[in-house]
Each structure stands twice: as C-alpha cells, then as structure tokens.
Amino acid sequence: MEPFKLGEMEQRFAELIWEKAPIASGQLARLCAQEFGWKRTTAYTMLKRLCDRGIFANENGTVTVRMTHAEFQAAQGEQFIDEHFDGSLPLFLAAFARRRRLSSREVAQLKQMIEDYEEDKDERNT
C-alpha cells in the first residue's frame, strides 16, 4: 500500500474529515451514511485504513487530523517525484516545462521560492 495514494472514496472520506475534524467517530459514521450511503462498519474500516497511514487519529472516540490537507498534498507530490523522477525535482520541472510553457508569473514565483529557501537555509546555518 502506498501511504499517500488514495482511491476516489478514500479521498472523499478524507476531505470530509479534514472539513469536520475534530469530530466524534460516531458522528462521522452518521455523516458517511448520509453522504455516501455507507454502513457504520464501512466508515470505521475506512477510518482505520487512513489512521494506519498516519493521516488521521481516532483516540477515545474522537477523530483528529495528524496530517493537514496541505501536508498530505506535499507528501503526495514527494511520493510522485520519488517514484517517477528518481526523487529529482529538477527532472520533474524539466519534464513539466517541456509539455507546458511556464508563464512569466510562474517563473517569478519559482524564483521567489528558491530565494526564500536559500534565505531560510542561510538563517538556519548561522
């Protein structure tokens, strides 16, 4: 199982949790019945799966977020680059830019991200 790849229903379920958390697990199961037509056991099975991946936690009947949606998306991106580009962000960007021309705004944003990263790195090293 790849920890950051979700099927369609897992993704919809995760988005529901991100929207509602913290939430009582029983209330979540009722929401899943309304939203997806799931039985209680299906909701709990799906919840366990996502908790086992470290995305959410279900402690004392309360479901909480262990990984925000943004953190999850970043992890998905890292996993994709690791699997398809040997972990090389420059190789990914080169492949991306060959298929779709970057706008001047996107190039400026990338440059700013690199400058911010270098400044943060310099601050950590001092």
Image (cartoon, helix red, strand yellow):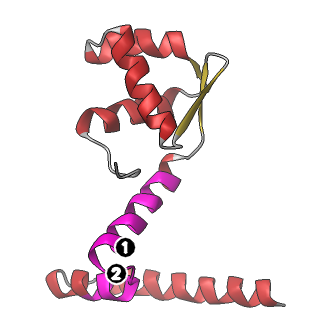
Relative depth, front residue between 107 and 19: 19
* Secondary structure category for the residue under label 1: helix
Identify the residue at image location x=67%, y=18%. Answer: 60
Crowdedness near tag 2: few (<14), some (14–19) or many (≥20) residues, C-alpha within 10 Å: few
Q: Position of residue 116 (x, y in %)?
A: 61, 83
Query: Callout 2, which amino acid?
Result: Asp
The residue under the point 42% across, 33% down is: 49
The percent position of residue 9, horizontal first and vertical second, equals 27, 32
For residue 16, what is the image quadrant?
top left
Kindly identify the residue that appears in the image at 38 percent across and 18 percent down: 43
Residue 101 left/right relative to 108: left
What count of labels does the image hold? Answer: 2
Instruction: Estimate the x, y position of residue 72 in percent, counting from the top left.
Output: 47, 52
Quadrant that contains the C terminus: bottom right
Q: Which residues are magenta?
A: 71-94
- Is the residue 4 above or below the residue 37 in the image? below
- The amino acid sitting under disc 1 is Asp
**Picture disc at residue 86:** 2
The outermost residue toward the right is 126
| Magenta region, main secondary structure | helix
Residue 21 inside the magenta-drawn segment: no
Q: Secondary structure at mark 2?
A: loop
Q: Is residue 87 magenta?
A: yes
- Local crowd size for mark 1, using a 10 Å CA cut-off: few (<14), some (14–19), many (≥20): some
User: Mark 1 sits on what residue?
Assistant: 82
At a point 15% along the width and 82% down the height, the residue shown is: 99
| C-alpha span from label 2 to label 1 | 5 Å
Instruction: Give how far across and how far down residue 20 sits, in percent.
Output: 52, 26
Quick one: 88 or 12, which is closer to the camera? 88
Is the residue under label 1 in contact with that under label 2 (CB below 8 Å)?
yes
